[in-house]
Amino acid sequence: MKKHSSLLPGLLLVALILAMCLISFFWLPMDPNKMDTANRFALPTFSHWLGTDQFGRDVLSRVMIASRSALLVGLGSVSVGTAAGLLLGSLAAMAGPRLQALIMRIIDGFMAFPGILLAMMLVAVLGKGLINSVIAIGIFMIPSFSRLVYSMILENKTRLYVKAARSYGCRSGQIVISHIFPDMLPRLITQFSSAVGGAILTESSLSFLGLGIQPPSASWGLMLSEARQFVLSYPFLAVAPGAVLLVAALGFNLVGDGLNDRLVKRGSR
Amino acid sequence: MFRLISKRLFSALAVMFVVSLITFMVLKWIPGDPAQLILGTEATPESLEALRTSMGLNLPWTAQYARWLGNLLQGDWGTSYLFGENVRTLILQRLPVTFSLTLFSMILAVCFSAGLGIVSALFQGSWIDRLSRSLMQLGAAIPAFWLGMIFMILFAAQLHWFPVTGYTPPAEGISAYLHSLALPSIILAIGESGVLIRLFRSSMLSALNQDFMQSAQIKGLPRTTAILKYALRSAMIAPITVIGSQTAKLFGGTVIIETIFALPGIGRLLLTSVEQRDIQLLQGIVLFITLMVVLFNFITDMLVIAANPLIRMESGGNEV
Amino acid sequence: MKKLICFGLSLLILVMSACSAQPTPSSDPAGPSAAPVKNELIMAMSVDPDGLDPQRTTAASTFQITNNLYEPLLKVTTDGTLKAGLAESWTVSEDGMTLTFTLRGNAQFSNGNPCDSAAVIASFERLKAEGSPRAADYANLMTMEAPDAKTVVFTTETLDVAILSTFAYPWAAIVDVTVADTLKNQPVGTGAYTLKEWVPQQSLTLVKNENYPETVNLETIQFKMMPDAASQISAFQNGELDIISVSGDQVAAFENNPAYTVVQAPANSLQLMAMNLSHEALSDLRVRQAINYAVDKDALIDTVWWGYGEKIGSHYPTVLKEYVDHSEDYSYDPEMAKSLLKEAGYENGLTLNLVLPKNYTAYVNAGQVIADQLEAVGIHCEISIVEWASWLSDVYNGRQYDLTVVGHTGRLDPYVLLARYQSASSENYFNYNNPEVDQLLSDYKAEGREAQRTEIVKRVEEILAEEVPALYIQDPISIYVLQKGIEGFATYPIDIYEMKDVRFTQ
């Protein structure tokens, strides 16, 4: 059935963003923060492939350097979410009924905050900036990972091999690490990849609202919010950052889907 | 049955309590002094202190929380210092905007996704299936604010099909009202349809593989009749839960679209209250949104229970 | 998809350049000959007022609107001279310490309560009370008496020659204190208009006060809250708005178009980058001078304000009569800046934090341009962008900053404008301390002679221009665009709108 697997195109798009990020460490067309006020809002030319912004900064260089923060926030926050989710989820699944109920109610509470609301509140408390975005979006990711881990452990708890291990006298933690975890890995990886796409979009939304990465640093969301001031006069400024953002989110989502088809569905059959 | 409902109700209330507590504690950590903000650049330390006392900002947070919760239970949501207006009034004033937006975009998204999802399930592997799969991926990955900007330039600023921003209440004309919400609803719908197309497609696929389709075929029923009579109906039931929870999530996730299109909805009120440290207002909104989410989920839960006798029977047993 | 969007957008650019000069569609389809003159005006505002109680806020967005709902005892003309407001006449005693105001006959609040001398005194009591952000400015009013229903007599504690102008600010407006608690959303005043409806973040509508004694041209004024400049412009071009305020980049689109009128005037305010003199490096005059030499103000004004601003060199707006041009005292010279830094011992670089208030896009942009220019001479700025709330508490009151970009709105009297440079002033967030300035400013308050007062102000201007506790940037120019046929819209030296004079001619 899966003739059109999304894994390959997804990996290609992700590779594109990764390559952009890697190249930015060795070579940038120009200094991304160097202003050239006499030469602002320039349309794409040979020296500025994507034109210049309202301060005459090179848009291509800024798009490239912004890929670093996007990937950092994307991968970083999801790692935070996965780690904390693993811990909380397995704790809840292995704990006694009271602790279990308490943890799950708190997770439910966090999950009841829809969309970006929780991230906005967390930023209001933590303050803005790159690292705080990682933390805020990471916390924002915890509930869904906890839920996933929790339900997978419960599912496996009743399986024969776990019962067998228990009857041999294995302790709970040991069972989770050495028996259940390997079984969860494919689904975790799948969820991880899809979540990175979501985290990159959340980061750009926060930056767009002025709650994420702060100027003069470059972020795709921030570049779009700056472009919005001049969108009627200079609409081309909004093209590049939005397109790259789309490529990044699409890439990670496609990889997540592709992995889901390969690892999870095949494994369960 | 009754036991199950009361159990769900209890857990919904517990969630609300946890949410209000989380919100309250989180907001206590927010830097910036509301009293300072009210009095501005020329306040004296004495007047600041007096205002803090009268606002109850000097009490320990537990006492403040108890006071707030007590008032809330009596129907007093507090007063926004920014607008000088009752928080409940402010929220209710904006409810129609966010509610219409959620409703319209959900209707659009469901119609569009159901059509596309079902057709692509029927013609699996065809160009339409491939198209819908691409749309599904694009819908999930395209940043709403970017799409919003593009649509705004194209359809509002250039083609003048829709007003650029702003909201017209239905009282000033139904057509103008629908016009003012059209673009934002379409953009939200595009974002939602990513999940929904996938859902309808797989739900229709599994309906097509059900036993009843085979028995219909054996009975000699034409495929079209069988699809229309049985498969479609069965395929529409499963997505209801997801639609319920998606609607709830969407309700709290309209802030970006409301900001771009300058719609006076709950999302923008929320952003303003975050920026201006209007704590009472922020608490009220967060609580209201989560209340709606919990309510939506509760109703969806009840619908599912009502529709599925199996769960009703299981309810006496082990619940996770 | 990407290709398609690129294509679509480049198409758009073409379309846009082709139709930038399209005429406004007539809002009245009946045609100009039969149409009655329009009676309703719609104006865009980017933010909501911070409540409609002028005595409990410092927000300009409030005063712009409340100026039409309430009246102060005195008003100002467009060039800043005082004229009758709620008081039809006034006298100042020989010693300058007793002020007598005679109220307009039969003045009435919009709820029908009489606005007599007792009401005026009650209103001033409230302005001086706790919770009023401007209380300190009126502490000098020692006694307030009402010999009869139309007369109010104020006595000051010490001589303040500038006191009369304090009666003309929008926050000194007379409010009905019997409904003080609800003024924030149910304003009651004696102004030309009354509030019909306010739906925050959507619109605010005023209707004509039928009891107002002077001519009020328009029946209804609607302020539409549109935070986004792009949508304001687009709605204006669609004919949905009558007046908008625009930034310099948009002027070209309207300037030579007969369908619009462009009104521009210096805003009588100041924009500057303040320095915290308690920072070790910034306490050194050479470092402050270096910063002034390092910034190319012309390029800065061009980039951020599109050239719409008057370059300044001291803390004084260009429109006031005591203004002296110091804008070239430290003209752009990065080499000079470097050598001054070297002299001061910072040849290996200096790092300063630069705090910018988020809500003001122009200041955030200006800060970034300044940081870029300072980088070129070896001063590195750590930029942090904060909410207005944090700016007020940490920078303005807490004085925890090195550099910050901000604006100061116009005042009618030089003293109020300069008072923040007194070493003991609570508003002296520069931590500036110069005994000569302290002396000059206290002399000013007691100086009765006009010529001497002007000299004092000019001397203070000169000292500030020389010691540069701030990088003085510009007196901005405010720009409004009006649909053709609107008359009577004027700008004032304080941040108010006077809507009663506005009318349509066609």
Image (tube, coloured by chain):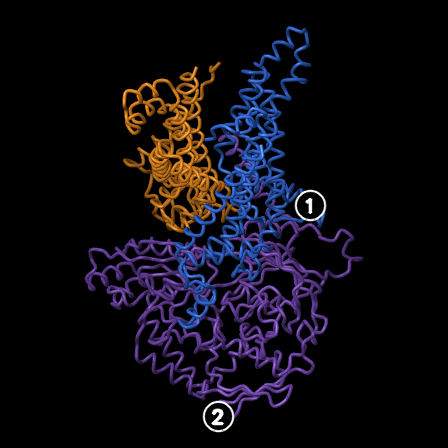
Chain colours: A orange, B blue, C purple
Which quadrant: the C terminus of chain C?
bottom right
**Looking at the picture, does residue C139 appear above or below residue A158?**
below
Q: Pointer 2 indicates a residue of which chain? A: C
Q: Eyeballing the image, is B202 above or below C402? A: above
Q: Residue at x 38, y 81 (%)?
A: C441
Q: Position of residue B25 (x, y in %)?
A: 41, 52
- Across and down, in percent, residue C373 comes to 33, 55
Closer-to-camera residue (A265/C325)? A265
Near-viewer residue (A105 or A213):
A105
Q: Residues within 10 Å of mark 1 (few under 14, many from 20)?
A: some
Residue C394: image location, x then y, percent: 36, 62
Q: Chain of mark 1?
A: B
Give residue C104's quadrant in the image.
bottom right
Mark on residue B176? 1
Q: Quick one: label 2, few (<14), some, or many (20+) residues within 10 Å?
A: few
Q: Position of residue B256 (x, y in %)?
A: 51, 44
Res B2 → quadrant: top right
Residue under numbered circle 2: C95
The secondary element bearing badge 2 is classed as loop
